Amino acid sequence: MLLEIKDIHVHYGKIAAIKGISLEVDEGEIVSLIGANGAGKTTTLKTISGLRPLTSGKVLFNGEDISKMPGHKRVMAGIGQSPEGRGVFPGMTVQENLLMGAYTRKDELAADLAEVYELFPRLAERKSQFGGTMSGGEQQMIAIGRALMTKPKVLLLDEPSMGLAPMLIAQIFQIIKEINKRGTTVLLVEQNAQQALKLSDRAYVLETGRVVKSAPGPALLDDPQVRAAYLGGH
Amino acid sequence: MKGNGVTGNANPLRRVGALVDGARDWWEHAKAWQRYAVYLGAVVFALILPAPAIGTFMSPGSDWTTVLIYPIGTYILLAVGLNVVVGQAGLLDLGFVAFFAMGGYSVAYFGTEYGWNYWATAVMGIAMAAVSGVILGAPTLRLRGDYLAIVTLGFGEIVRITANNTDEIGGARGITNVPHPTDIPGVVDFGLLPAPYYYLIVIAIVLVIIFSVRLQKSRVGRAWAAIREDEDAAELMGVPTFKFKLLAFAIGAMIGGLAGGLHAGRAVFIEPNTFPFILSATILAAVVLGGAGNLPGVILGAFVIAWLPERFREVNWLKDLLGRDPAEYRILLFGGVLVLMMALRPEGLLPSRRRKAELHEGTGGMGTMGAEVTGPDTDVSTEAAK
């Protein structure tokens, strides 16, 4: 198991945001977390990447307990994240943003940079434009590309479709699939359940800080409860 | 966003803005020798600045060289130091005067009590300031935005009040007879004449600027920029954010300590009220007014903030207009000018391009203070959860 979360609890002050979530991500998979606002999806990702401290429970990566490891070291261990709301550095150019992803790396970057530009030709056209002046979709591309530059074993994506036009959403999901095909494991948080489930090998449904359901992605697409709650179906 | 709140293209400030943009473009593409020529020009300008011909216009009422040392030179030095913290790392520090005080008191105390050589006390002042920066930073830098600002504000006051109540360092009476800098035989004698102190502070400013620019262009500078623009994202890039914030605090503090040491060595007398909160606020105003993060802007801002109140002491046409001494109104005039400048150039007098992009995005502006402001596409629930 590449990434394993065992019964984690996370608090914001006295408020419990996560009340005992366990989940697993195997190498090569695309796993998604779906659920409504406040279900704890983003907090789960932040806990995995080390931005939020755990109250109790364990995060295992490659079988190693990383619960106490600070966030910046988890990047080196192989956890890359594209944060919620994209978190692009507005005052850095596209290229500088991507190079920030390689901040801790000392090996040759050219090939990886070329690969990101190949995945996102739009970014290649705008290398020297400031991140802050890019459109929402382009910023999402920067955020994903920047996370890829950390050379992650598992890529955590927090709502990559947020605020994007439907055409762009389809494009972004296609790229996520391509990234996965090239060998990066993906853990995806989405409100756009339909798209996410189609793409995922497996998915977890979160509700108020707990996992209420887990199954292969396509199976959840047909699940009447999930359809009613997240897919707007009947 | 430039020229926000201003309509019409005929606005002279717009034209100034265009001129600034042009100069910046030229600078970005300038060759190495052109840049060195500009540096050389700036140093020569600084060296001839105390000339009486300039002084009669700049400071008709008081001795120009003295004004150049304090407030102008000292403010510039402090502003360059605070710029490391606020402009580069994006941490809002409202108690910067504490480090100025640490430097000043170190020089005064070790010079008078133990008779140390001035230069040794100055180094000691820088070290003490750095240590106090780390002591302040270690527990507080986990806070963000407004909370950090409040804690630093408290720290500035704690240092001043502690000095006020500690008899060992003179209490409210302060320390008198602080030794002047040790003479360098055959080169310079530090006595009552202001000129040597002026050149000393120019050397200090030049060194600090070189240091600051080198830092900005290094890996450290890149890490600071990332922290300023989005701290969480910086951590996700593998930047040890806490360590780098602490480093910014320590380096800013060292520069503040240096300024304090230089000040004590010239002023001979320091007391707790030499280091009031308002000085922290004034230096912060200089950094923001000039264009946080951009050194030429910060220097210009410090100059304007230090010089204007002095200049307003002697404005003859105002004297005729008001029928009274404008010196009484100088702070009012000063405030008016500040409001006007911020209304017309809200990003600062000389903002960097990068800073403009940051402000446009609504992050990183006033360091973390800006990062806490919810942008139009930020999820409110996550802001509340921070």
Image (spheres, rainbow, N blue to C red):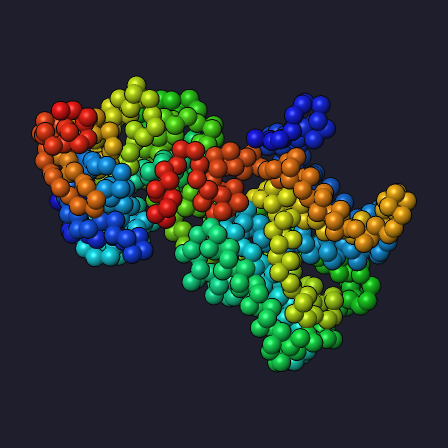
Residue B124: x, y in percent? 59, 69
Asked where in the image residue B126 lies, by quadrant, the reply is bottom right
Q: B381 or B365, which is in the foreground? A: B381
Q: Is residue A44 above or below residue B104?
A: above
Frontmost residue, B5 versus B367: B5
Q: Of all residues shown, which one is farthest toward the top? A: A167
Relative horizontal placement of residue A12, taking residue B23 as reference (left or right): left
* Location of residue B75 in the rendering, given as x and y in whole percent from the top left corner: 68, 54
Quadrant including the N terminus of chain A: top left
Indicate the position of residue B331 as horizontal and vertical percent values: 74, 51
- Residue lying at 68% horizontally and 49% vertically, measured from the top left: B302
- Can residue A217 be seen in the rendering of this structure? no
Q: How many marks?
A: 0
- In the shown orientation, is residue A143 left or right of residue B162? left
Residue B276 visible? The answer is: yes
Q: Quadrant of residue B298?
A: top right
At a point 10% along the width and 29% down the height, the residue shown is A224
Q: Is residue B206 left or right of residue A47?
A: right
Residue at 54% x, 49% y: name it: B86
In depth, the one of B120 and A54 nearer the eye is A54
Q: Is residue A46 above or below residue A142?
A: below
| Image location of residue B122, percent across then percent down | 63, 67
Q: Residue at x 47, y 28 (%)?
A: A133
User: As displayed, is residue B234 above or below residue B166?
Assistant: above
Q: The C terminus of chain A lies in which quarter of the figure?
A: top left
